[in-house]
Image: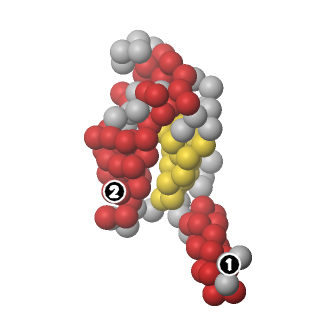
Amino acid sequence: MKSLEELRKIREAALKKVEMREGGKDYRVVVGMATCGIAAGARPVLNRLVEETAKKDYNCTVSQTGCIGMCVYEPIVEVYGKDGEHTTYVHVTPDMAAEILEKHIAGGQVIEEYTVAAAAAGNKEV
């Protein structure tokens, strides 16, 4: 059985996670972490996003989700803005993830050649 102090610490940690997800940030960055994403290399992508976000104060929260439904394009990173914008990046590598943070989150510039639209149009190898 956990002590009352341990339970308080668990509660505080959970509240901080909810606060990070819901509060104050202009962007939410989501990584597909279903079996297909993990097999394609999503874990190093997620780790890089978390590491880079911890180093710099990017205006985003980073989270993970299950299957996004486009397994052939994994690893997938989706960027959601408060204004309703939604960008899907595909075949993301850890270096691309860092670039997405720098250009899209910090600079407000979508990296078109990394998007699902570019991949579907044949501008990126699938």
The C terminus - image quarter: top left
Report the coloring of the rendering. secondary structure
Q: Which of 37/91 is in front?
A: 37
Looking at the image, the residue that sits furthest to the top is 122
Image vertical order of residue 8 relative to residue 38, above or below: below
Residue drawn at (55%, 47%) of the image: 64
Label 1 sits on residue: 2
Q: Which of 9/64 is in front?
A: 9
- Identify residue type, mark 2: Glu
x, y percent for residue 49 = 39, 51
Residue drawn at (57%, 23%) of the image: 70
x, y percent for residue 116 = 48, 25
Which circle, 1 or 2, is nearer the viewer? Answer: 1
Image vertical order of residue 60 relative to residue 66, above or below: below
- Identify residue type, mark 1: Lys
Residue drawn at (43%, 41%) of the image: 43
Which of marks 2 and 1 precedes in the sequence?
1
Q: Can residue 116 be seen in this view?
A: no
x, y percent for residue 20 = 56, 66
